[in-house]
Image (cartoon, grey):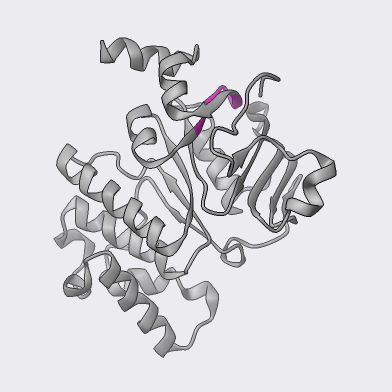
Amino acid sequence: MKDNISVGADPRVRPCLDSRSREEDAGAVVLELQNIGFEYGSHRVLDGVCLSVESGGHLAVIGRSGSGKSTLLRVIAGLEAPADGVVLGHGEVLSEPGLVRVAPEKRRMAMVFQDLGLWPNLNAEENVRLGLSGLRLKRSESRRRAAAALRRCGMEELAGRLPGSLSGGEQQRIALARALAVEPELLLLDEPFTGLDLVTREEIMREVERLAREQSVTLVVVTHDPWEAQRLCDVGVVLEAGCVVDGGSLPSLIENSESAIMARFRADRE
């Protein structure tokens, strides 16, 4: 991140904490990334990514295809170990170079994947309950959580339906219910609205907004669409070639950022 970039337009989303304040702020900081790097073979995918998000913050990570944004989400979730840097939650080291210290299911995080990841042979309720398997809940508690999550997402009446018999928007709600059923503190969204028509996309975004507010969930949203980012988040960072090149309030980024993706967005808007 450039020295003059401040991600503090929303006080709940900031650059890396100063070491002097880290101890006193650790409890409020849901997620902190310190100089995260990642490599696929000899290809550097992430380089020096550094930011923190406090409880209730909504952060958008905006970038073109190949910018490293989905990989960053996988590192946050614990699905990949960083090559450099550390991932912390409430001051606890979750991942460090080459090692995932806290397994994904132990992180109080949930992720909605771009392809949704629904099992076609399982009905809606079973797909939601599958997301709870790592928590080792009693069957009755698993069923209760699944039913509650489906109800919150307006899918209770379709609990017995297979994904293939549902619309794209309904499948999206199942994936969201599966994420919310684990009662996450941090919800990670990886291009979750790709492929939906405009009306359905708006409906699902309103649903995410409502549920995040009601459940007091912190959001990190990965997207290539600045409009989508602004719809869900107050603040964002721009990722190019694995590096954070800009950050701040989304209205300011959209109007003033010199990054390629924002310049293209302004040009297309005109």
Residue 111 placed where, x, y %?
46, 54
Residue for point 61% across, 62% down: 107
Vertical position of residue 131 compared to residue 228: above or below: below
Number of numbered markers: 0
**In this image, 164 relative to 242: left or right?**
left
- In front here: 218 or 106? 218
Residue for point 60% across, 26% down: 244
Residue 89: quadrant of the picture: bottom right
Residue 25 placed where, x, y %?
73, 51
In the picture, the quarter occupied by the N terminus is top right
Vertical position of residue 215 compared to residue 11: above or below: below
Residue for point 33% across, 59% down: 175
- In front here: 209 or 153? 209
Vertical position of residue 18 compared to residue 155: above or below: above
Residue for point 57% across, 54% down: 55
**In this image, 209 relative to 40: left or right?**
left
Is residue 99 something one can see in this rendering? Answer: no
Residue 95 placed where, x, y %?
71, 52
Residue 145 placed where, x, y %?
39, 78
**In this image, 166 relative to 89: left or right?**
left
In the picture, the quarter occupied by the C terminus is top left
Q: Main secondary structure of the magenta part?
A: strand
Instruction: Report the magenta residues as a range.
Output: 236-244
Residue 46 highlighted magenta (yes or no): no
Is residue 20 something one can see in this rendering? Answer: yes
**In this image, 3 relative to 209: left or right?**
right
- In front here: 153 or 179? 153
Residue 240 highlighted magenta (yes or no): yes
